[in-house]
Image (cartoon, rainbow, N blue to C red):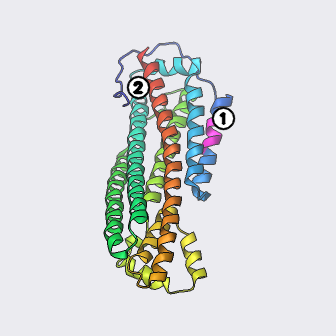
Amino acid sequence: MAPSPLHPKASRHARSISLPSRSHPLTLQVEGQLQRLKASEATSSSMCHNLGGLRDLYDSVNDLLHLPLTQRTLAQELGQKWIDEVLDGSLRSLDVCGTARDVLSQMKQSVTELQSSLRRIRGESGLSNEVEAYNMSRKKVTKVISKCLGDLRKVQKQRAFSSLLDKNHDIVAMVSVLRKVEAITLSMFESLLLFVSRSKAMSRPNGWSLVSNLINKKRVAEDEEVMERCEFEKVDVVLGAFVGHKTHKGFEFRHVEAQKRLETLELSIQDLEDGLECIFRSLIKTRVTLLNILNH
Protein backbone atom coordinates (compact mmCIF):
# COMPACT_ATOMS: atom_id res chain seq x y z
CA MET A 1 0.00 0.00 0.00
CA ALA A 2 1.06 3.59 -0.40
CA PRO A 3 3.49 4.94 2.21
CA SER A 4 2.31 7.48 4.74
CA PRO A 5 2.68 11.21 3.94
CA LEU A 6 6.00 12.83 4.67
CA HIS A 7 6.41 15.81 6.89
CA PRO A 8 9.86 16.96 5.82
CA LYS A 9 11.71 19.66 7.70
CA ALA A 10 14.06 21.76 5.68
CA SER A 11 14.82 25.42 5.30
CA ARG A 12 14.10 27.08 2.01
CA HIS A 13 17.00 28.01 -0.19
CA ALA A 14 17.42 31.72 -0.75
CA ARG A 15 17.97 31.17 -4.44
CA SER A 16 14.83 30.56 -6.46
CA ILE A 17 14.80 27.73 -8.96
CA SER A 18 12.06 28.16 -11.53
CA LEU A 19 9.65 25.51 -12.65
CA PRO A 20 8.86 25.13 -16.31
CA SER A 21 6.58 28.06 -17.07
CA ARG A 22 2.98 27.75 -18.21
CA SER A 23 4.25 27.69 -21.79
CA HIS A 24 6.07 24.40 -21.22
CA PRO A 25 4.51 21.72 -23.47
CA LEU A 26 3.91 19.27 -20.60
CA THR A 27 2.19 21.90 -18.47
CA LEU A 28 0.00 22.91 -21.39
CA GLN A 29 -0.72 19.25 -22.11
CA VAL A 30 -1.91 18.61 -18.54
CA GLU A 31 -4.10 21.70 -18.55
CA GLY A 32 -5.56 20.75 -21.93
CA GLN A 33 -6.37 17.25 -20.67
CA LEU A 34 -8.02 18.71 -17.57
CA GLN A 35 -10.33 20.80 -19.73
CA ARG A 36 -11.19 17.85 -21.96
CA LEU A 37 -11.92 15.65 -18.96
CA LYS A 38 -14.26 18.23 -17.46
CA ALA A 39 -16.14 18.47 -20.74
CA SER A 40 -16.21 14.68 -21.15
CA GLU A 41 -17.50 14.14 -17.62
CA ALA A 42 -20.38 16.50 -18.31
CA THR A 43 -21.36 15.04 -21.69
CA SER A 44 -20.04 11.48 -22.12
CA SER A 45 -22.16 8.50 -21.12
CA SER A 46 -19.13 6.17 -21.26
CA MET A 47 -17.56 5.74 -17.86
CA CYS A 48 -14.76 3.63 -19.37
CA HIS A 49 -13.96 6.43 -21.81
CA ASN A 50 -13.69 8.92 -18.94
CA LEU A 51 -11.47 6.58 -16.92
CA GLY A 52 -9.21 6.23 -19.94
CA GLY A 53 -8.91 10.01 -20.10
CA LEU A 54 -8.02 10.12 -16.41
CA ARG A 55 -5.31 7.52 -16.96
CA ASP A 56 -3.83 9.59 -19.79
CA LEU A 57 -3.91 12.65 -17.54
CA TYR A 58 -1.80 10.89 -14.91
CA ASP A 59 0.68 9.75 -17.54
CA SER A 60 1.25 13.43 -18.36
CA VAL A 61 1.36 14.42 -14.67
CA ASN A 62 4.03 11.80 -14.00
CA ASP A 63 6.06 13.05 -16.99
CA LEU A 64 5.78 16.58 -15.60
CA LEU A 65 6.91 15.49 -12.14
CA HIS A 66 9.99 13.81 -13.60
CA LEU A 67 11.29 17.02 -15.16
CA PRO A 68 14.53 17.97 -13.31
CA LEU A 69 13.42 21.57 -12.80
CA THR A 70 10.08 20.42 -11.40
CA GLN A 71 11.81 18.09 -8.96
CA ARG A 72 14.29 20.72 -7.79
CA THR A 73 11.58 23.28 -7.22
CA LEU A 74 9.35 20.86 -5.30
CA ALA A 75 12.32 19.89 -3.14
CA GLN A 76 12.95 23.58 -2.51
CA GLU A 77 9.42 23.88 -1.08
CA LEU A 78 9.98 21.34 1.73
CA GLY A 79 8.08 22.26 4.86
CA GLN A 80 5.50 24.35 3.03
CA LYS A 81 1.85 23.62 3.84
CA TRP A 82 0.84 23.11 0.22
CA ILE A 83 3.29 20.22 -0.06
CA ASP A 84 1.41 18.39 2.69
CA GLU A 85 -1.86 19.26 0.93
CA VAL A 86 -0.66 17.62 -2.28
CA LEU A 87 0.50 14.52 -0.39
CA ASP A 88 -2.77 14.28 1.52
CA GLY A 89 -4.67 14.64 -1.73
CA SER A 90 -2.73 11.83 -3.39
CA LEU A 91 -3.46 9.54 -0.45
CA ARG A 92 -7.15 10.46 -0.49
CA SER A 93 -7.36 9.67 -4.21
CA LEU A 94 -5.77 6.28 -3.58
CA ASP A 95 -8.24 5.51 -0.79
CA VAL A 96 -11.29 6.36 -2.87
CA CYS A 97 -9.91 4.44 -5.84
CA GLY A 98 -9.39 1.44 -3.55
CA THR A 99 -13.00 1.64 -2.37
CA ALA A 100 -14.23 1.76 -5.96
CA ARG A 101 -12.13 -1.31 -6.82
CA ASP A 102 -13.56 -3.21 -3.83
CA VAL A 103 -17.10 -2.25 -4.79
CA LEU A 104 -16.67 -3.45 -8.37
CA SER A 105 -15.08 -6.69 -7.17
CA GLN A 106 -18.03 -7.38 -4.89
CA MET A 107 -20.50 -6.60 -7.66
CA LYS A 108 -18.73 -8.89 -10.12
CA GLN A 109 -18.76 -11.72 -7.59
CA SER A 110 -22.51 -11.27 -7.06
CA VAL A 111 -23.14 -11.22 -10.81
CA THR A 112 -21.06 -14.36 -11.32
CA GLU A 113 -22.91 -16.21 -8.54
CA LEU A 114 -26.30 -15.25 -9.96
CA GLN A 115 -25.23 -16.33 -13.45
CA SER A 116 -24.23 -19.70 -12.05
CA SER A 117 -27.61 -20.04 -10.34
CA LEU A 118 -29.47 -19.19 -13.53
CA ARG A 119 -27.60 -21.94 -15.36
CA ARG A 120 -28.27 -24.46 -12.60
CA ILE A 121 -31.82 -23.68 -11.55
CA ARG A 122 -34.72 -23.62 -14.00
CA GLY A 123 -37.65 -23.15 -11.63
CA GLU A 124 -38.86 -19.76 -10.42
CA SER A 125 -39.17 -20.81 -6.78
CA GLY A 126 -35.53 -21.82 -6.59
CA LEU A 127 -34.32 -18.64 -8.27
CA SER A 128 -36.23 -16.21 -6.08
CA ASN A 129 -33.78 -16.68 -3.21
CA GLU A 130 -30.81 -16.25 -5.53
CA VAL A 131 -32.19 -13.01 -6.94
CA GLU A 132 -32.89 -11.77 -3.42
CA ALA A 133 -29.28 -12.55 -2.44
CA TYR A 134 -28.10 -10.48 -5.42
CA ASN A 135 -30.39 -7.63 -4.36
CA MET A 136 -29.03 -7.74 -0.81
CA SER A 137 -25.49 -7.57 -2.15
CA ARG A 138 -26.47 -4.53 -4.22
CA LYS A 139 -27.86 -2.84 -1.13
CA LYS A 140 -24.68 -3.55 0.87
CA VAL A 141 -22.57 -2.10 -1.92
CA THR A 142 -24.80 0.96 -2.01
CA LYS A 143 -24.27 1.49 1.73
CA VAL A 144 -20.48 1.32 1.29
CA ILE A 145 -20.68 3.81 -1.56
CA SER A 146 -22.94 6.13 0.41
CA LYS A 147 -20.49 6.21 3.33
CA CYS A 148 -17.52 6.81 1.05
CA LEU A 149 -19.26 9.67 -0.75
CA GLY A 150 -20.42 11.16 2.53
CA ASP A 151 -16.89 11.13 3.95
CA LEU A 152 -15.49 12.57 0.72
CA ARG A 153 -17.99 15.41 0.56
CA LYS A 154 -17.40 16.22 4.24
CA VAL A 155 -13.66 16.53 3.62
CA GLN A 156 -14.19 18.65 0.52
CA LYS A 157 -16.57 20.95 2.40
CA GLN A 158 -14.16 21.47 5.29
CA ARG A 159 -11.04 21.71 3.19
CA ALA A 160 -9.19 25.02 2.89
CA PHE A 161 -6.12 25.49 0.72
CA SER A 162 -3.10 27.37 1.96
CA SER A 163 -2.41 30.79 0.48
CA LEU A 164 0.14 31.11 -2.31
CA LEU A 165 0.28 34.90 -2.40
CA ASP A 166 3.98 34.94 -1.51
CA LYS A 167 4.94 32.43 -4.21
CA ASN A 168 6.32 33.16 -7.65
CA HIS A 169 4.20 32.61 -10.73
CA ASP A 170 5.75 29.25 -11.65
CA ILE A 171 5.08 27.68 -8.25
CA VAL A 172 1.52 28.99 -8.26
CA ALA A 173 1.00 27.45 -11.70
CA MET A 174 2.32 24.06 -10.57
CA VAL A 175 0.24 24.00 -7.37
CA SER A 176 -2.84 25.02 -9.33
CA VAL A 177 -2.37 22.16 -11.78
CA LEU A 178 -1.87 19.56 -9.02
CA ARG A 179 -4.95 20.79 -7.15
CA LYS A 180 -7.04 20.62 -10.33
CA VAL A 181 -5.79 17.09 -11.02
CA GLU A 182 -6.87 15.96 -7.55
CA ALA A 183 -10.26 17.66 -7.95
CA ILE A 184 -11.06 16.02 -11.30
CA THR A 185 -9.82 12.65 -9.99
CA LEU A 186 -12.17 12.70 -7.00
CA SER A 187 -14.99 13.97 -9.19
CA MET A 188 -14.48 11.06 -11.60
CA PHE A 189 -14.47 8.54 -8.76
CA GLU A 190 -17.62 10.11 -7.35
CA SER A 191 -19.32 9.78 -10.75
CA LEU A 192 -18.25 6.14 -10.97
CA LEU A 193 -19.58 5.29 -7.52
CA LEU A 194 -22.89 7.00 -8.28
CA PHE A 195 -22.98 5.14 -11.59
CA VAL A 196 -22.68 1.81 -9.79
CA SER A 197 -25.10 2.57 -6.96
CA ARG A 198 -27.87 4.37 -8.83
CA SER A 199 -30.88 2.24 -9.66
CA LYS A 200 -34.38 3.54 -10.33
CA ALA A 201 -35.88 0.10 -9.83
CA MET A 202 -34.23 -0.43 -6.42
CA SER A 203 -34.62 3.10 -5.10
CA ARG A 204 -38.35 3.67 -5.50
CA PRO A 205 -40.88 2.19 -3.02
CA ASN A 206 -42.25 -1.17 -4.13
CA GLY A 207 -39.92 -0.96 -7.10
CA TRP A 208 -40.17 -4.59 -8.14
CA SER A 209 -43.98 -4.61 -8.28
CA LEU A 210 -43.95 -1.36 -10.21
CA VAL A 211 -41.57 -2.84 -12.77
CA SER A 212 -43.74 -5.95 -13.03
CA ASN A 213 -46.71 -3.76 -13.92
CA LEU A 214 -44.67 -2.00 -16.56
CA ILE A 215 -43.83 -5.33 -18.18
CA ASN A 216 -47.36 -5.58 -19.50
CA LYS A 217 -46.81 -2.54 -21.70
CA LYS A 218 -45.64 -2.75 -25.30
CA ARG A 219 -42.23 -4.31 -25.86
CA VAL A 220 -40.99 -1.26 -27.80
CA ALA A 221 -41.81 1.09 -24.94
CA GLU A 222 -40.01 -1.21 -22.51
CA ASP A 223 -36.89 -1.36 -24.69
CA GLU A 224 -36.76 2.43 -24.93
CA GLU A 225 -37.02 2.77 -21.16
CA VAL A 226 -34.41 0.11 -20.39
CA MET A 227 -31.92 1.47 -22.92
CA GLU A 228 -31.85 4.79 -21.06
CA ARG A 229 -30.38 3.11 -18.00
CA CYS A 230 -26.87 1.92 -17.32
CA GLU A 231 -26.11 -1.79 -17.30
CA PHE A 232 -26.59 -2.05 -13.53
CA GLU A 233 -30.08 -0.60 -13.80
CA LYS A 234 -30.94 -2.77 -16.80
CA VAL A 235 -30.18 -5.89 -14.76
CA ASP A 236 -32.26 -4.60 -11.84
CA VAL A 237 -35.23 -4.02 -14.14
CA VAL A 238 -34.95 -7.39 -15.86
CA LEU A 239 -34.63 -9.26 -12.56
CA GLY A 240 -37.62 -7.40 -11.18
CA ALA A 241 -39.68 -8.56 -14.14
CA PHE A 242 -38.17 -12.03 -14.06
CA VAL A 243 -39.19 -12.96 -10.51
CA GLY A 244 -42.94 -13.32 -10.18
CA HIS A 245 -43.63 -14.05 -13.85
CA LYS A 246 -46.46 -16.58 -13.86
CA THR A 247 -46.54 -18.21 -17.26
CA HIS A 248 -43.97 -20.81 -18.27
CA LYS A 249 -43.46 -19.15 -21.65
CA GLY A 250 -42.89 -15.78 -20.03
CA PHE A 251 -40.53 -17.27 -17.47
CA GLU A 252 -38.38 -18.93 -20.12
CA PHE A 253 -38.17 -15.71 -22.10
CA ARG A 254 -37.16 -13.69 -19.03
CA HIS A 255 -34.71 -16.40 -17.99
CA VAL A 256 -32.80 -16.02 -21.27
CA GLU A 257 -33.02 -12.23 -21.13
CA ALA A 258 -31.67 -12.15 -17.56
CA GLN A 259 -28.69 -14.28 -18.56
CA LYS A 260 -27.86 -11.96 -21.45
CA ARG A 261 -28.10 -8.86 -19.27
CA LEU A 262 -25.89 -10.39 -16.60
CA GLU A 263 -23.28 -11.37 -19.18
CA THR A 264 -23.23 -7.81 -20.51
CA LEU A 265 -23.00 -6.40 -16.98
CA GLU A 266 -20.10 -8.70 -16.13
CA LEU A 267 -18.20 -7.45 -19.18
CA SER A 268 -18.97 -3.84 -18.24
CA ILE A 269 -17.70 -4.38 -14.71
CA GLN A 270 -14.54 -6.00 -16.04
CA ASP A 271 -13.90 -3.00 -18.29
CA LEU A 272 -14.35 -0.65 -15.33
CA GLU A 273 -12.06 -2.79 -13.19
CA ASP A 274 -9.37 -2.73 -15.86
CA GLY A 275 -9.63 1.04 -16.12
CA LEU A 276 -9.46 1.50 -12.34
CA GLU A 277 -6.48 -0.83 -12.07
CA CYS A 278 -4.52 1.32 -14.51
CA ILE A 279 -5.45 4.48 -12.63
CA PHE A 280 -4.58 2.90 -9.28
CA ARG A 281 -1.09 2.08 -10.55
CA SER A 282 -0.74 5.62 -11.90
CA LEU A 283 -1.80 7.08 -8.55
CA ILE A 284 0.79 4.97 -6.75
CA LYS A 285 3.44 6.01 -9.25
CA THR A 286 2.58 9.69 -8.75
CA ARG A 287 2.69 9.40 -4.97
CA VAL A 288 5.99 7.50 -4.98
CA THR A 289 7.48 10.14 -7.28
CA LEU A 290 6.38 12.92 -4.94
CA LEU A 291 7.74 11.09 -1.89
CA ASN A 292 11.04 10.40 -3.61
CA ILE A 293 11.42 14.05 -4.61
CA LEU A 294 10.79 15.19 -1.04
CA ASN A 295 13.06 12.53 0.43
CA HIS A 296 16.16 13.72 -1.42
Q: In the image, is residue 31 part of the stretch drawn in magenta?
A: yes
Image height check: is 247 above or below 26? below
Question: Compared with residue 200, is residue 65 higher up or lower down, i.e. above or below?
Answer: above
Residue numbers of the magenta segment: 29-34
Disc 2 designates what residue? 80
Given residues 279 and 165, the one toward you in this image is 279
* Type of secondary structure dominating the magenta stretch: helix
Is residue 83 inside the magenta stretch? no
Give SS at disc 1. helix
Of callouts 2 and 1, which one flags the residue occurring earlier in the amino acid sequence?
A: 1
133 displayed left or right of 13: left
Image quadrant holding the C terminus, namely top left
Quarter where residue 169 is shown: top right
Decide if residue 23 is in sight here. Answer: no
Which residue is more in the foreground, 2 or 270? 270
Q: Residue 161 sits in which quadrant? A: top left
Residue at image location 53% in from the left, 49% down from the top: 271
Foreground: 206 or 90?
A: 206
Point out which mark residue 28 bears: 1
